[in-house]
Amino acid sequence: MQNPEAISYLTQSQAAEIDEILMGPLGFSVDQLMELAGLSVATSIAEVYKPSEYNRVLAICGPGNNGGDGLVAARHLHHFGYKPFVCYPKRTAKPLYTGLVTQLESLSVPFISVEDLPLDLSKDFDIVVDAMFGFSFRGDPRPPFDNLIQKLNCINTYDQTRQKFSAVVSIDIPSGWQVEGDGGPEGIKPDMLVSLTAPKLCAKNFCGPHHFLGGRFVPPSIADKYKLRLPPYPGTSMCVRIGKPPQVEISALRENYISPEFLEERVEADPFDQFRKWFDDVVAAGLREPNAMALSTACKNGKPSSRMVLLKGFDKNGFVWYTNYESRKALELFENPHASLLFYWDGLNRQVRVEGSVQKVSDEESDQYFHSRPRGSQIGAIVSKQSTIIPGRHVLYDQYKELEEKFSDGSLIPKPKNWGGYRLKPEMFEFWQGQKSRLHDRLRYSPQEINGQQVWKIERLAP
């Protein structure tokens, strides 16, 4: 997030000049910039409006580049899991635009004429993308766009019968606004503005809750020439938020999960096999740190504590992680050798709880894992007297640097005696799958003995 006051804003002439430079000396083509712009819009929408709640998207596209951005955004939104519709009343006959239409038609994205649009767009659509006019537009909107702008103005009329409003998303500038002014009292008041390249001056008058910057293609030469102050894009993201996100009522935050049913007759009889199946799903889905788990322990008096650790192995003998044997969790496990693990995989609406007894792994197993770690992590394990009080980060840095120099010859770094692994032997598994209206699936595996053999009993728990 970036303070809007610390951001550069472009005039209409500056925006035009930058486009000419991008498509001239710097070698960008219109279709390249359009593709990046449309992707930025789609990712900005996905940052705020989840397809499970805001699925039906209408993109109203004008005849110019802004309309092309809207067509590209509609294609990406389709692949993101939304259901886009397109209103494109004044089509451009150039190959670039006809190609974008063909791409959408190949995905069976419906095109709707102006005449077939409902009087109240908010009844049929969860999001309306305003891609009619960009920064180069001058004058007053002509039919049918003047009427379409009026339709967008009516969307935010308060209606107590609805649980949520339809969202209006404007690309680069709200259609009908003056690039260096605003839209006046009758202008579009979007919920989201996705500025491209850099915000235009009119963006200072944007009062909606979500302002994003997209179009991750501004090279240093342009930034230096125009003295642009732009926020850094996080990671691999194609968009970055400008300003603080809106304040929300915590009690109103909720997710209506949409997941396949998790039924007893379809699960593995052995919980270890079921865990492996779900874990493989998480890895295949590309979720970040699928092996992250909350480890909960308690001292002999029953006072609990939790922290996130990383699973480093599992098999039929149990779940393994590594830590400092003088840390708080280690001291609690010494007093009370029982723990609970919780895996939460948000992208798949799943979580797994595992409870059981805990014991240390062998010195050989700890030593083997320790020397498989990056050398920096090995040194870090020696430096950190986990859970003890230290005067500042400089202590860690100084000790790390000293040991890094000591072992710079590549010699073996000895594992500290107070560092090693633990193994939790499961006595209970619970697999949770989020479902609509809080009617979640919960299946518990607990051991029982039948004819002298241990088997796992599967029971469904109320959500």
Image: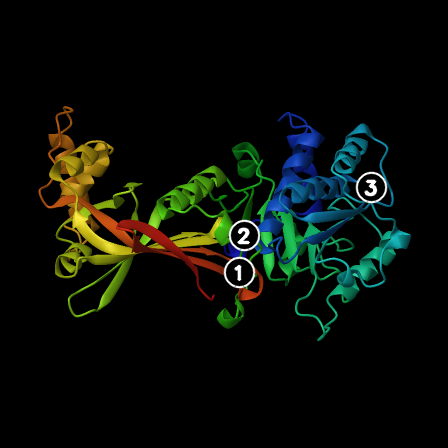
The quadrant where residue 403 appears = top left
Going by the numbered disc 1, the residue's amino acid type is: Pro
Classify mark 3: helix, strand or loop: loop
Q: Alpha-carbon distance for marks 2 and 1?
A: 8 Å
Q: Which mark is residue 63?
A: 3
Compared across the picture, whether 153 is left or right of 7 comes to: right
Whether pointer 1 and pointer 3 mark residues with C-beta atoms closer than 8 Å, the reply is no
Residue shown at the point (62%, 51%) measured from the top left? 45
Separation of disc 3 and disc 2 at Cα?
28 Å
Q: Do the residues under discs 2 and 1 have CB atoms within 8 angstroms?
A: yes
Could you tell me residue 297's position as x and y percent? 23, 60
* Horizontal arrangement in the rendering, residue 451 relative to residue 173 (left or right): left
Element assignment for label 1: loop
User: Quick check: 370 above or below 141?
Assistant: above
The residue type indicated by label 2 comes to Arg
* Numbered label attached to residue 241: 2
Q: Report x, y in % for residue 150.
A: 83, 61
Q: Secondary structure at mark 2?
A: strand
In the image, 143 versus 445, the foreground residue is 445
Looking at the image, is 374 positioned above or below residue 460?
above
Residue at the spot of label 1:
245
Give how far across and how far down residue 163 sits, in percent.
66, 70
Residue at 15% over, 66% down: 300
Residue 65, position as x, y percentages in the image: 75, 39
User: Quick check: 149 left or right of 237?
Assistant: right
Seen as rendered, the residue at the extreme left is 417
Q: Is residue 289 visible?
A: no
